């Protein structure tokens, strides 16, 4: 189904480890608005999407979010590589280290573990696409927050790339929503057909 190229979508080469940065950036792996939730959301929703072209968009973006998980994981790993015990203690990342050492495990910046409760798959195309657009904006805001807290260009450059992809995904989902709404309106699914009501649209 997918062709995997063994390289990151955008290069990550962090020269200066920083446990404080790792502690907040990990939220974009396993937090409520992170890449794991995004990927699972879109890949789950695509099955019930009634239009193959829109299901294809969900598949494309869901797959790209897997690549973004790979990038965020690489960022966190490089930020924590070779840190001393004292550096981990000072950052508060010692509680993560004691459970996972330098392994990558999906959690929010708060330490809350990833849960599928972070995303929804309702089987209604309008509902799901609205959720998807909101998810992309929440992820973009989270990346904005990270950029306000981190200054190392080795870290901010890939974060800016990821942020831009959230904006692009939002636009693609917006186009898909307009597309789906027009089709459903044509079938009188979400819109009252004036020909069925004597030429009048019911008042709200």
Image: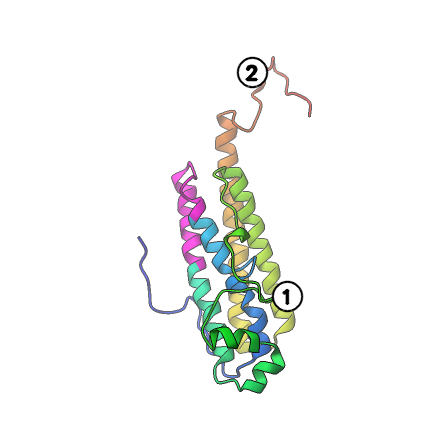
Residue that mark 2 sits on: 195
Q: Is residue 13 magenta?
A: no
Q: Nearer the viewer, residue 113 or 157?
A: 113
Residue that mark 1 sits on: 145
Q: Position of residue 54 (x, y in %)?
A: 43, 42
Q: Is residue 82 above or below residue 115?
A: below
Tell me the quarter of the image containing the C terminus: top right
Identify the mark nearer the N-term, 2 or 1.
1
Can residue 150 be seen at all in this image of the molecule?
yes
Q: What number is the disc on residue 33?
A: none
Q: Position of residue 4 (x, y in %)?
A: 32, 62
Magenta span dominant secondary structure: helix
Q: Nearer the viewer, residue 17 or 112?
A: 112
Q: Nearer the viewer, mark 2 or mark 1?
A: 1
Q: Nearer the viewer, residue 67 or 80?
A: 80
Please state the extent of the stretch shown in magenta in the rendering: 44-65
Mark 2 residue element: helix
Q: Is residue 100 above or below residue 173?
A: below
């Amino acid at each position: 189904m997918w062709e995997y190229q063994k390289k990151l979508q955008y290069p990550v080469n962090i020269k200066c480890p920083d446990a404080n940065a790792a502690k907040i950036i990990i939220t974009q792996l396993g937090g409520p608005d992170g890449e794991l939730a995004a990927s699972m959301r879109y890949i789950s929703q695509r099955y019930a999407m009634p239009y193959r072209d829109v299901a294809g968009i969900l598949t494309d973006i869901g797959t790209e979010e897997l690549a973004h998980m790979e990038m965020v994981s690489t960022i966190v790993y490089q930020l924590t590589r070779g840190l001393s015990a004292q550096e981990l203690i000072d950052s508060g990342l010692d509680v993560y280290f004691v459970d996972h050492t330098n392994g990558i495990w999906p959690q929010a910046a708060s330490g809350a573990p990833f849960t599928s409760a972070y995303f929804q798959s309702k089987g209604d195309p309008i509902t799901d696409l609205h959720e998807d657009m909101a998810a992309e904006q929440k992820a973009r805001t989270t990346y904005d927050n990270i950029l306000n807290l981190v200054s190392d260009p080795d870290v901010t450059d890939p974060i800016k790339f990821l942020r831009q992809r959230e904006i692009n995904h939002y636009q693609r989902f917006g186009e898909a929503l307009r597309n789906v709404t027009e089709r459903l309106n044509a079938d009188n699914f979400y819109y009252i057909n004036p020909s069925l009501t004597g030429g009048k649209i019911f008042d709200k």
